Image (tube, helix red, strand yellow):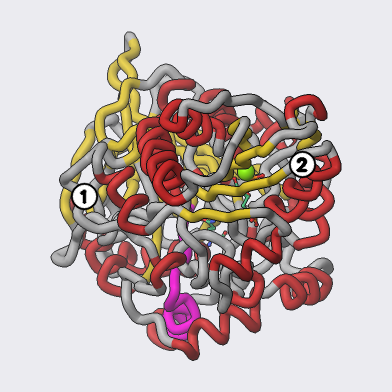
Amino acid sequence: MCGIVGIVGNSSVNQAIYDGLTVLQHRGQDAAGIITINNHTFSLRKDNGLVKDVFHTRHMKRLQGNMGIGHVRYPTAGSSSSAEAQPFYVNSPFGISLAHNGNLTNAEQLKEELFSVARRHVNTTSDSEVLLNVLAHEIALTEKLTLDPEDIFKAVTAVNNKAVGGYAAIAMIIGQGMLAFRDPNGIRPLVFGKRDSSKGTEYMFASESVALDSCGFEFIRDVAPGESIFVSNDGQLFSQQCSEHASYSPCIFEFVYFARPDSTLDNVSVYAARVNMGTKLGEKVAKDWADKDIDVVIPIPETSCDIALEMATVLNIPYRQGFVKNRYIGRTFIMPGQEMRKKSVRQKLNAIGREFKGKNVLLVDDSIVRGTTSAQIVEMARESGAKNVYFASAAPEIRFPNVYGIDMPSVTELIAHGREVEDINESIGADGLIFQSLPDLIEAVAKENPEIKTFETSVFDGHYVAGDIDQAYLNRINDLRNDSAKSDNEQAMSSGLELHNQDSVD
Ligand SMILES: O=P(O)(O)OC[C@H]1O[C@H](OP(=O)(O)OP(=O)(O)O)[C@H](O)[C@@H]1O
Ligand SMILES: NC(=O)CC[C@H](N)C(=O)O
Ligand SMILES: [Mg+2]
């Protein structure tokens, strides 16, 4: 999952973009980038690292201009080379840059078509560079020097007809303006808001509403699935539905894990959805585990805290923060490579012995994906003297790869793949394990916005809403992106492809 922001302002936007990216850091910890337009020229700074490490004062000073976009990256395609950090840039037509959250599932085919039909070269292995070139090609077909909103919308309609997968994107076109668009299923989130200044209205696009809050922008609404919004250079906003097949199927994992609880996505408060997950799971525990004498409910910080607190209320059992989280360690699930993820759990979480000693504890997490966290946490609870360690997951068993922007390409790395609850319980070493059912999870989220009839739930049920996924594709991404293949790729890439990122050299 990546985080994207874009601002069309009336004064310098560099600091607001930086601030917006900082509150979206939980969506991507690998790389960050900002590109601005000043006097018809792009200024770009992108590199591997956290926002606070990538942008120094000297970079911020160079990022001048009243319009800009930013990106924090969690790679799902290509490599983690800094050349694949975003935003991407193409010089023709006009000069276009783009930041993308999501994953295209037909990127290889589009890349071939771009070369054979448009003679466009894509220099990296990133699907986002492909998306930018498809957009650029469609805009070039207008053959005009000044674009009308209709030209932009026609180009986005063509992109929507060609690109398959999950994408929320923000692009800037020199001399024309900024556009934002979302795939026809609305898999990845995208919101926009406004701020009034003495010189007129300023607009901001972002992956999550929390970025608008922190930058002082007032939430307007979500970008609809298949919709495109264009803000012209002179600050006028236009919008149009650019897909005939648009329908809401947002990724349910945003609500389980990815998004911040203080965000509202697709009119669903992430916090409220998580509380509902806690209610449902609490009721299930009360029903199925009436025989278990649980003394205390303990969350596995940070994402599961709201869920666990609600479960404790439903069960009428004390809630205790039995693990302390090291605030300087990021999210472990989105770290690259299993070694790093494994090591980070112990660095990140430490048990408070007295909350475990001699007790029957119920540990609660939002999800169990590879089992990296749960296995170690159960061990820590035992080391701290727990009598019995029970485990509850607010998401159902994750058995299928994700292809729309979450880096879970390999079924064999998923702890629930080919295993039933008993076997998973044995793998994590707990005395009992319970999962939320998929209908209950869907109900927990849908309760907040009954207008959403379907969610993207492929990791739980193997149904891929954007279509076009067959076993051959899944085998290919497994071969390309399983942990050991990725580490081989990184080594091969480390010396190349720094073509358009000379700025990373101090
Ligand atoms: O089964 P696993 O492969 O370990 O993945 C699941 C765990 O990873 C996530 O936590 P993470 O540390 O990324 O972030 P958090 O602090 O927001 O909970 C998630 O909240 C689970 O705890
Ligand atoms: N997680 C994402 O949204 C990733 C975006 C894009 N596919 C990349 O790998 O850079
Ligand atoms: Mg967690």
What amino acid is found at the position of numbered circle 1 in the picture? Ile
Q: Quadrant of residue 234?
A: top left
| 261 to 199, vertically: above or below | below
Q: Measuring 24% from the left and 40% from the top, which residue is drawn there?
A: 447
- Please state which of residues 198 and 458 is positioned toward the viewer in this rendering: 458
Report if residue 395 lies within the magenta region: no
Disc 1 to disc 2, C-alpha distance: 39 Å
Q: Residues within 10 Å of mark 1 (few under 14, many from 20)?
A: some
For the magenta stretch, what is the residue range? 100-115
Q: Secondary structure at mark 2?
A: helix
List x then y, in percent, for residue 58. 74, 29
Q: Measuring 64% from the left and 35% from the top, which residue is drawn there?
A: 301
**Residue hosting label 2:** 381
Q: Quadrant of residue 203?
A: top left
List x then y, in percent, for residue 302. 61, 35
Report if residue 103 lies within the magenta region: yes
What amino acid is found at the position of numbered circle 2 in the picture? Ala
